[in-house]
Structures are given as C-alpha cells and as structure tokens.
Amino acid sequence: MKIGHSFAIGLLVRLIVFVGLVFLLVFAFGLEGYGAGKIVLVLAVAGALWWLWHYIQATNVALARFIDAVRFGDFTQGFAYQSYGSGFAELGAALDEAIRKLRGERHTLTEANRFYQAVLDDAPTALLTVDAEGKVELTNKAARRLLVKHKGVRAPDFGIYGDAFMKALSGGAVGRPRLVPLLTDGLPQTVMISAAIVQRLGGLVRVVAVQPIQGELNAVEIAAQSDLIRVLTHEIMNSITPVTSLAHTAVDLLAKADRDGDPDIADARTAVETLSRRADGVMQFVESYRQISRAPQVKLKSFGVAAWVKELDTLFRASDAADGVALETRVDPPALKMEADPDLLAQVILNLLKNGAEAARAHAAEPRVLLNVQFLPTGEVQIDVADNGAGVPDSLRADVFLPFFTTKAKGTGVGLSLARQIVLGHRGSIAVSDSPDGGALFRMVI
C-alpha cells in the first residue's frame, strides 16, 4: 500500500472517531442528567482531537527533523515510525533511506576531499593562493619548504625573495609561464611561475605555481660545457699530437747534427726545442681541462659535520696556503649530520680555503678565512667560505665558475668550475657575494 493511501485511511478513521464523539457529546447535552457521562464524553472528544492532531503533526515533525538534519549535516538521525502505523512506517523508511544516501554521499565526498588535499599538499610544485584582498597563502608543503624567510601575508611581504617574485605574486598574465629569479638564503635561483584563476567559496582566487628549475638549467649548462670541452680537447689533441711527436724527433735529429758547432744548426735546434716544449705545454694544458668534461661521481653517505670540519682544519693548516692566515670554523648545531660525498666536498672546501687565504694574504694586514656550516629551516645545509681579501667584483661574479676563466697569473680556471660541478652533482647551488669582512663569500646550499 502506498504511503499516501495509508495516511488517508488513518486520517479518515480519526476523523470519523472525532466526529462521532462530537455528535454523541451534542446529543448527551440535550438530555437531562448524565453529568458523569457528559464529562467522560468531553474527555473523549479532547482525546480524539489530540489523537487526530498528533497524527497530522507527526508528519510535519518528521519532515522538519529531516530538513534540520540535512541543513546541519546531522546524518545520524533515524525516522522509524512503526508504532504509528498507517503509512508512518513507510514514511520513516523513506526518510531513513534518504539519510543513508546522504550519509554515503557525504562519506564519499569527505574521502575524495582528503585524497585531493593529500595530493595538493604533497605535490612537488610549490602552490600559493592570492585572494581578492591580496592575501597570500602557502597552500602545500613544497611552498612552505621553499618560502621560509618572509613575515606577513601580503605580496609586498614577499619582497625578501626579490622584486621580480613579489611582482609576479601581485599580478601578471594568467596561464602564461615565465622565468623569474628567486632569492633564497642569499643564492639566486630561477623559478618558473604560472598562474590560474579559480573560484573558491563564491570568490575568485589566483593560484600561483612556483617551480624551481635552476637544477635543470644547471644540468643543461654543465652538459653543454662538457660536450664543448670534450669536442675541443679531442680536436686539439688530434692536431697537436703529431706536432709534438715530430718536434721531439726533430730535436733528436738536430742534436745529432749539431756536432761541428754550426751556428745555423744551433739556432734551428734551439727553435725546435722551444717548439717541442710549447707543444708539450699545450698537451698538458689540454689534458688538464679534460677532467672538466668528466662529471665527478658523487657517492652519498651520512657523516658528522663537526668531525669532518675538524679534519678540513687540520689539512688546511698543514698546507703552504695556511702560512700566516688564521682559520675560524663553526658548526651549527654541533651535532649536525649531512648526506653528501665528504671527499668531493672536502676537495671543494680546501680549494676555496686556499683561494681565500691567498686573497687575504695579498690584501689584509691580518689575513683570515672562515668556514661556517649550518642547518637551514628548509632541511638543507649551508656551507660558507669567507675571507677578508679584496673580494670578487660584481662584473666578474657571473664568470668565476666558467671553465677556463681565471684572474690569476698562473691559474688554469679549473678549480671553481670543478667545484661548481661537484656542488651541482649534489643537487645543490653555489654563488659568490661579499663577506662581512669585505672579502669574498662563497656560499653553498646542499
């Protein structure tokens, strides 16, 4: 039987009972006496009226409870009305089924929301949102790891990462990626920024994606340099090898011929010997650069930084470069550990300490160098090598890590280029700036 038919029958029965009792009450009041019977009939009419009213009101109450349950998200409500009969059981079952479906849909939506929230939070790309009032929010873990230095929630508060990055947050073309420099821990890196407009809670929100690509750019640059050096050294050595061999042969032949003291032969012998030495020098020069084309193999392992720095201190002080130069070392925290190749990094640090000592000794009355290793809030390790020498001019800072570039009279231009390769092999970064003492500060973040 349908719910409507059951409800109609129940309502008709209660109306008949109520109307019948009213007629009896009217009839009783037309008779003399029967006071107690009249009182009983009045009570019966009142009871029938309540029975009819409660029957009608129960439907409204059930529907009102159902609407409140949906409005307040309370899907634990039940609507069983077996005791009412006449269709209320069917009504309660229908409402219970609706509540169960709503509860299931809510559970599905909650699980989906948790999944998408986890995907968003663990996404490798840093995501930020900028609302209509200009409030900037770091949306996921990648953003919170990348941007740790600012204080505030407005775009100008992010100026600490560079004006270009701040302007990119403030506005710009939507959906058109662009490359922007980002300053983190004093080291500039290139990030790719793209933005999109989405609707959230009835308002429009600008979603900004920040993807660091400095590592990829460095890898491409190093690969291009290695390929170029490999080709150049191969071609040069192919050309110079026979020249060197012929020069050595000519030196031997002229040495045998120069027995009678002929001045012309002596001059020719001197010229050929000079040519032979220069050819050997070129071969040695080219061979020294071939190591740049071979990327160092990084072997990562965990080690205590304090003991490693103490060993570097000992090695530096035992070298000629340390003569008359004070070395200060710092490790923060003292129990710091890092995951890296200690041997390759030691090669980089000792080379930087040697360069810093030479620069400080040539410039300062009390030459000194500093090695400072500290843990960063981003989970990375920062290594600083500073001196109080003359420093590196701004015009040369973009060139000092290039292969073959050197400002020393006897330099080869290999050291800093190889240092950069080693740092990049650790997926780190290296840059040069001014030290607090006015000299050079080489900063590595690994």
Image: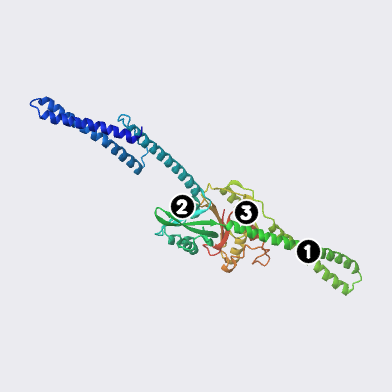
The residue shown at (31%, 37%) is 62
In this view, 127 is above or below 61: below
Give the position of the N terminus as an image quadrant. top left
The Cα atoms of the two marked residues, 2 and 1, are separated by 61 Å
Name the colour scheme. Answer: rainbow
What residue does disc 3 label? 425
- Image quadrant of residue 155? bottom left
The residue shown at (29%, 32%) is 9
Q: Horizontal and vertical percent for residue 2? A: 35, 34
What residue does disc 1 label? 280
Q: Disc count in the image?
A: 3
The residue shown at (23%, 35%) is 53
The Cα atoms of the two marked residues, 1 and 3, are separated by 32 Å
Q: Horizontal and vertical percent for residue 392? A: 58, 66
Q: Which of 82/365 is in front?
A: 82
Which badge, 2 or 1, comes first in the chain's sequence? 2
Q: Nearer the viewer, mark 3 or mark 2?
A: 2
Q: Amino acid at mark 3?
A: Gly
Which badge, 1 or 3, comes first in the chain's sequence? 1
Q: Which of 256/190 is in front?
A: 190
Q: Residue furthest left?
A: 32
What residue does disc 2 label? 139
Residue 86 placement, left or right of 176: left
